[in-house]
Structure formats: C-alpha cells, structure tokens
Image (cartoon, helix red, strand yellow):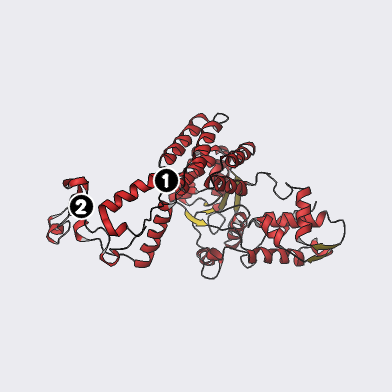
Amino acid sequence: MIEPLAERMRPRSLDDFVGQQHLVGPGGVLRNMIDTGRISSMILWGPPGVGKTTLARIIAHRIEAPFFTLSAVSSGVKDVRDVINKAKDRTIFSVGSPVLFIDEIHRFSKNQQDSLLGAVEEGTVTLIGATTENPSFEVIRPLLSRCQLYVMHSLGKDDLEKLLHRAISQDVELKKKEITLQQSGALLRYSGGDARKLLNILELVVDVAGSDHIVITDKVVEERLQKNPLAYDKQGDMHYDIISAFIKSIRGSDPDAALYWLARMIEGGEQPEFIARRLVISAAEDIGLANPNALLLANAAFDAVMKVGWPEGRIPLAEATVYLAASPKSNSAYLGVNSAIQLAKNTGNLSVPLPIRNAPTELMKDLGYHDGYKYPHDFPGHFTEQQYLPDEIRNTRIWHAQHSPSEEHLYQWMRTCWGKRFEDN
C-alpha cells in the first residue's frame, strides 16, 4: 500500500525541515538544543500542519533516544503509565531520556496530565507535547511549568512553494508523471499555511487527473476541490477558517452570519469551551468600552457552558453571539494596550515617579519614595492632577476614545479631569 504524499514527504532531518526558522534555523533555540544534545521537555503550540510531530521525531532521531508516541484522543491514564514503565526500562540502555511525544495534549484530562508529572520531573522521559490550543488554558500549570513553550507558525508563501516544488521533483510517485506547476495561487490559498493540507490537495489533483501529463492551474485546483470539498480536510471541520468567519461576523455586526458559523462549529463537533473562549476574547477586543456588559455576558456564557455542556450549552453561546454581534464596537482598549506594550519596548525600564512609588520602609521614605503623593479621594470629584507616567513620556497619549455612546461618557470625564491633554480626540 502506497503511503500518502504528506507522509512520504515528511522530513527526516532539520536540513529538510521547512519553516519555523525562528526555532530551527541558524542560531534557533531548538537547533542549538539539538546540536548540544541537551533536550528539555517542551510544548509545541501551533496550528495543524506546521511540523510539530515531524520536529519531535527529528529531535528523537538526532539525540538517538527511544521514541514513544501517544494520541490524547485515544489514550488514557493506563496507556500513559504503560509507556512510562517502558521508558524506564529503555532508559538503562540509552544515552538520554526516551522522548514521549503526545499529540493533541490539550485533550488530556487533568488526571491524565497529572500522571505525567513524576516522569517529567524525574527525567524518566523528555516530554514533547503538541497542541493547537493555547497551553495556558489547556495544560495544567504544574506540567506547563516543567516544560518550555515554543510557538510554531503557519507556513508562509515561500515555504509552501518550496514544499510544492520539492514534492513534484523528488517524490518517488510524482516523479513518474510529467507535472507542470503553471499556477500555485489556489493551492496556497486552500492550504491555509498547512503543509499537510497542501500536499493532500496536490495529491488529490494529481490522482484525479487521469493522465501522466498534468498541468496544474488555479482553475484546475478549484474545480477539483469543488467536486471533492472535504478531500483535503480529513476531519471536514475547517477549524480555523470557520472560527475566523465567526469572529469576523461578530466584529462586522452581522448576527445572522455569526449564528450560521456558530451552527457550523456545533455541527462539526467543536469543543464548546473553544467557542466560549473566543466569545470572551471578542467581547474584550471588538466590543470593548462601547458596551462593557458584553464581556460580562460572554464570561457568563463561558461559565454556563462549562456547567451544562451539550446540547443545552448551545443556547447561552447563541445568546452571547447575538448580543456581541448586535453591540456597538470599539477596539480602543485593544489598541491602547498594544500601543503601551510597544512604548514599553521602545523606551526600556523608565523610572517610576517618586511620589507614586511604594514606601514600606523608613529608608525608602527618606529617599523620597511616596513623598508628595496626592490621595485622589481627598479631593473634590475624587481627582487631582498629578504625574503618573515617567518623566521621559509624561505627556504621551496612549488611550484614544472612539466616541461610542458608552465610551463618550468616559472621554468627557477625562476631558473634565485632564483638560487639554484629552482635547486632541
């Protein structure tokens, strides 16, 4: 039986690995780690098809360590313990700790993750977990603290084109055919930065061509995928495309579209907490100060879904979806914190003004800490003007109101407090 193209093209070494140069390129943290042979437990976080499994296998091969793999979808606590016991036996005969790769580690329960702690702490195994979900939410804190976190990105155009040309010119099966890659735009677009999906689409187009002389154009690719819409997505869930459509529909104030994409996720078997978490983020990022109640409702929907589960959980999700989509929008807080972070990066460790420093000791008081601080509640309106930013950026504006009805009230109060400082809005 012939292996799928994506498996045949799986890189066996770092030199063949495409993408993630920030990790495996010259001077990259993982390349340096591999070259020295000292590997620590890690979590690889990134979308599907960016090389998480492949990288784990390459690491194990390079350090000549036994390689064990588990899928969080089909493995339980007993499977974890069995693998750890096998790893203990192999440790005696190997130079380094066996590598235990767990795909979709975010699907492991707390008990399953707890069962890994001892082995990781003692060095019985070097854990490499792969996840498409934010580990801060999905991986228990004790396990996360024992692992380094590395973020992997969707592949860019150059990386995908390199994969295409390599597959056509080097794969043992594709070399048997005369393939002309005339256009690649549709291939890249449908792949969405996913190497596996890209190679699956290429294989589909070649397999259904019915000839050994194949010219690949955007039109050919689009026609093939319209006839076989799920052929390149084995799960049929279009996970990232649909969540993107869902969030953009909320941001664009279209409750009908938002409900449709919500329904698609529900029917596709999406995890309810995944949807609820995105609603909380959208409420803070896109609705923001234009309707602060949106964040409260989204968070309440999250709590409700976690309590009631499916199928009833669809109702609070729908309520939050409609409310967020129909709410006025503002991203002033989102833009403000991004500006503040960039300002902090650009200006370095500026000193805190002395009056607003903490002064828990007599020495600090003698040095002027807290000296001159004006307690706002002692003044009319609970406000008095004083300096809170460092001297070097004391007049810098970071938050800019966007004048929705709710936010306008905040803006006018700031004008009352600070006068001309807020008159440029």
Residue at 16% x, 46% y: name it: 378
Residue 150 image offset from top left, x and y in percent: 50, 57
Q: Residue at x 56, y 68 (%)?
A: 25
- Give the camera-side residue of 227 and 198: 227
Residue at 61 percent across and 46 percent down: it is 242
The residue that disc 1 covers is 290
Answer yes or no: is residue 190 visible: yes
| Residue 53 spot, x, y in % from top left | 61, 54
- In the image, residue 341 above or below residue 315: below
- What's under tag 2, amino acid-wise? Thr
Does 388 sit left or right of 406 as displayed? left
User: Amino acid type of disc 1?
Assistant: Ala
Residue under circle 2?
384
Depth check, front residue: 281 or 415 = 415
Query: What secondary structure is found at the residue carrying circle 2?
Result: loop
Quadrant for residue 261, please give it.
top right
Tag 2: Cα neighbours inside 10 Å, few (<14), some, or many (≥20)?
some
Q: Between residues 355 and 359, which one lies in front from this camera angle? A: 355
